[in-house]
Amino acid sequence: MINISNLSFGYKKGNLLYKDLSLSLIEGNIYGLLGKNGAGKSTLLKNIAGSLFPIGGCVSVDGMIPQKRLPSFLRAVYYIPEECFVPAITVKQYTALFGIFYPDFNADQLFVYLKELEVVVPGKLSALSFGQQKKFIIAFALACNTKVILMDEPTNGLDIPSKTQFRKLIASVMNDKRIIFISTHQTRDLENLIDQVVIIDSGNLLLSASIDEITSKLHFETVSELPAEIKVIYAEEHLKGTSIVRENTTGEDSRLNLEHLFNGTTQNPQLLKQIFTAKNNNHE
């Protein structure tokens, strides 16, 4: 379990990016972390990974404090930054150099994952394109079999077929002991992959909810005209009508539109909070 309690962090004194941010992530879930550019998505992942340290509050992973960077923590967490770097060495050399840090690293799995992602490394890794290098790092991270995998914009640099391969691979390796936390601004890349949505904006946690919870409380549809007397948190006009996100007052099923959810949450956070709070109170 990852527990973030009253996290405060800032790169400059007196200018906090986060203040008293609290969030819990539990095993067996793939989380999607959404936020505007500069909202602090990468910073949050780095605080969990232990490469940045909070100035207030606490982050823990299975009871371990990331900033202590104990071996037991480092072998349980793999962090993939947005900009990946691979040295001018072969796959064999890379696995010999870095695989030893992860007790559950499996070289056979690595080559299976590379095949699924269509990565062929004839020589040195540095000769690969940026997209291929990124896919290699993703395959290596998964083959390390860490309990926690943190991914910062993993689909940046990937073409459309590669994004499909990525989603299939992540879904196939997920189990009830793992936490996968993916930061992205490309919402459509995660729409059919994640179990939980986390949205942050201006240092605040606006939403942390499961897909089932979201679609039970919100309805996503396209209408010819806006409904009266129904709470609409987002509306977007297009050629076929107006796509809206509204309060789900009738228990209807609908398909989540992650982009519209994000826009509605960041543009109308108070109404969203009101809808979720009211529904929770009614359920209680």
Image (cartoon, grey):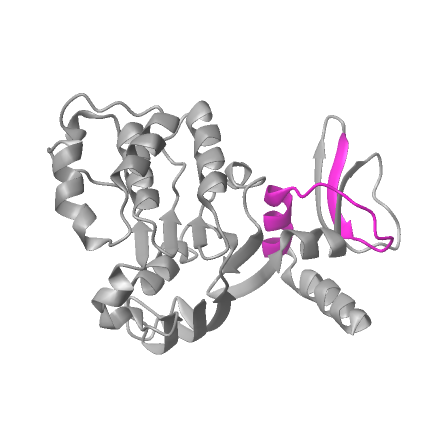
Which of the 4 image quarters holds residue 12? bottom left
Residue 120's x, y, as percent? 26, 22
Q: Is residue 191 toward the left or the right of residue 121 in the image?
A: right
**Highlighted range, magenta:** 241-267
The residue at the point 43 percent across, 34 percent down is 166
Residue 191 visible: yes
The residue at the point 84 percent across, 34 percent down is 224
Which of the 4 image quarters holds residue 216? bottom right
255 w.r.t. 103: above or below? above
90 w.r.t. 75: above or below? above
Q: Quarter holding the N terminus?
A: bottom left
The residue at the point 38 percent across, 72 percent down is 59
Q: Is residue 241 toward the left or the right of residue 138 in the image?
A: right
Viewer-proximal residue, 254 or 35?
Answer: 254
Q: Quarter holding the C terminus?
A: bottom right
Residue 137's x, y, as percent? 28, 39
132 w.r.t. 4: above or below? above
260 w.r.t. 272: above or below? above
Q: Is residue 250 magenta?
A: yes
Residue 202's x, y, as percent? 48, 62
Viewer-proximal residue, 210 or 267?
Answer: 210
Viewer-proximal residue, 120 or 21?
Answer: 120
Viewer-proximal residue, 83 or 94?
Answer: 94
Residue 31's x, y, as percent? 50, 53
Q: Is residue 98 magenta?
A: no
Residue 82 visible: no
